[in-house]
Structures are given as C-alpha cells and as structure tokens.
Image (tube, rainbow, N blue to C red):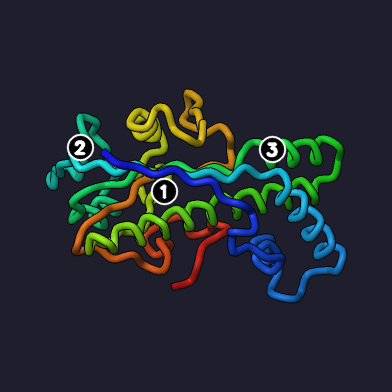
Amino acid sequence: MTGKTFQFEFRDLNINVDNIERAMGYPEGESHEAIYDIVVKVMKQVEAICDLKAEYRIFNDISYDDANRRITVQRTVLNTGKIIYRQIKKSDALALFVCTAGREIEERSRTAMRESDVLEGYIYDIIGSAAVEATAELMQDELEHFMKSSDLKISNRFSPGYCGWDVAEQHKLFGLIPDNYCAISLTSSALMDPVKSVSGIIGIGPDLKRQASTCRFCDMKDCLYRRQD
C-alpha cells in the first residue's frame, strides 16, 4: 500500500465570487451588489482560516464479486452498489481518499447564524463546501498525474452517500485509513467531523476513464452542485 498527503492553500483552489454566487442560485453577474460584497468579505476570511488537507492511499489487494457487485479491499467488503461498481470494476488498484477544509469554517457559519446573520452563515457554508470539493479535485489531479508515469489512468471519484452507496459504508472506508492525515472522525451515524470533509474511492488501471463530472451517474437530481453534461 502506498499513499500521499497534501496541504493546500485557498489560493490554490479555482474558486471565485462567480462560483459562489452560482452555487447560491444567482446567474452570473445578476446578484445584488450587497451579496457580492458579503461573498468577497467571507472569502477573505476563509482564506485566512481554512485548513485544507487531503490524503489518498492506494490498495492493490482487491477483488471483485460481479454477482453481488461487491469489492473486497484487503479483507473489507464494500457494497458500493451497481452504479459505482460498474465504473471501477476494471481497476487494478483502488485509491481511498479523505479531504477536509477544516473545522473553523463551519464554526464561523454556526456563529454567524447564532448571531442572526443567517446570510453570512449561509455563505460560509457554501464556500466551505466549495473549498472541500475543490481540494478533492486537486488531490485527484495529483493522483492522475502520478499514475500517468506508470501509464495508468483513473476513474472519477465516488463517495459513500451517492450513486446508491450507503453512507454507513463510510465506517468501512475509515477502517482502512484509521489514522488519516486529515484527522477526520466519524459519528455513529457515519457523519464526518469536521463537517466540511469528503471521502471516497477512485479506480486505477489502464482501461479507465475520468469523466468531466459524475453528475450523470448520480440520482440526486436536485443537488445544489449538479452539472449539466
């Protein structure tokens, strides 16, 4: 098993005000000036307080059960469901990953809402979600670049809770990376702490393809971040 850890800065992420306003539901250039100013202010705060970390670990001891669409990593059986299984079953190895934007962003969001500044709290929440997804994207870019040196490709990344993969399976995933660099822990109901964190799986092999997005695989039609392919 091999792996790599990362520490990113907010300026490393491809996030701007337009991205956040679109996530809030505003078409480009159509938000109120006051909204723009708040987003700019909060983004500056997030740049100073975020703690962007990521890690992947590569597992070669894997096997596939086509009949039940199950993947065994070492001795852990992952019931990813048919959508994810179909996308990664040609993998020769699997990368399990965790990423986080840190705890401070969610604390700022809660504080703002507790002090009745619901809009600012909401913007902190939106930026935190965007930051951790962008961190995962950078981590995946690094993995893809690393695999190219061995003439290998990667799949898209898939997380418990999406595409039919039960979020409770997150306990199994974290069992394979118990001492994770990001210091993410799980509640009994499989929620991550810090909240602005993501985890999941990426396939590795010569016959895989990384799509522009995974939205076409996902059944969450009303997702805030859904892309139109």
- The percent coordinates of residue 135 (x first, y second) are 53, 52
Three-letter amino acid code of the residue under disc 2: Thr
Determine the residue positioned at 18% across, 39% down: 61
Q: In which quarter of the image is the C terminus?
A: bottom left
Q: Quadrant of residue 195?
A: top right
Taking the image as drawn, is residue 160 in sight? yes
Give the mark nearer the N terminus: 3 vs 2. Answer: 2
Can the viewer see residue 199? Answer: no
Closest to the observer: 28 or 52?
Answer: 52
Numbered tag placed on residue 104 in the rendering: 3
How far apart are the two marked residues, 1 and 3, measured between alpha carbons? 26 Å
Q: How far apart are marks 3 and 2 (CA)?
A: 36 Å
Q: Which residue lies at the image location 51% right of the left edge and 62% below the top edge?
A: 226
Mark 3: few, some, or many residues within 10 Å (few <14, many ≥20)? some
Q: Which mark is residue 72?
A: 2
Q: In this view, does 185 lie above or below 106?
A: above
Q: Which of marks 2 and 1 is in front?
A: 2
Q: What element carries label 3?
A: helix
Q: Which amino acid does label 1 sit on?
A: Tyr
* Residue at (22% x, 64% y) in the render: 151
Per the image, label 1 sits on a secondary structure element best described as: loop
Which of pointers 2 and 1 lies earlier in the amino acid sequence? Answer: 2
**In the rendered view, would you say 144 is above or below 31?**
above
Q: Nearer the viewer, residue 9 or 184?
A: 9
Q: Do the residues labelled 2 and 1 touch (CB within 8 Å)?
A: no
Q: Is residue 211 left or right of residue 37?
A: left
Query: Neighbour class for label 1 at 10 Å: few (<14), some, many (≥20)?
Result: some
Say the numbered circle drawn on residue 162. 1
Q: Is mark 2 on a helix, strand or loop?
A: strand
Look at 35% across and 28% down and name the residue there: 175
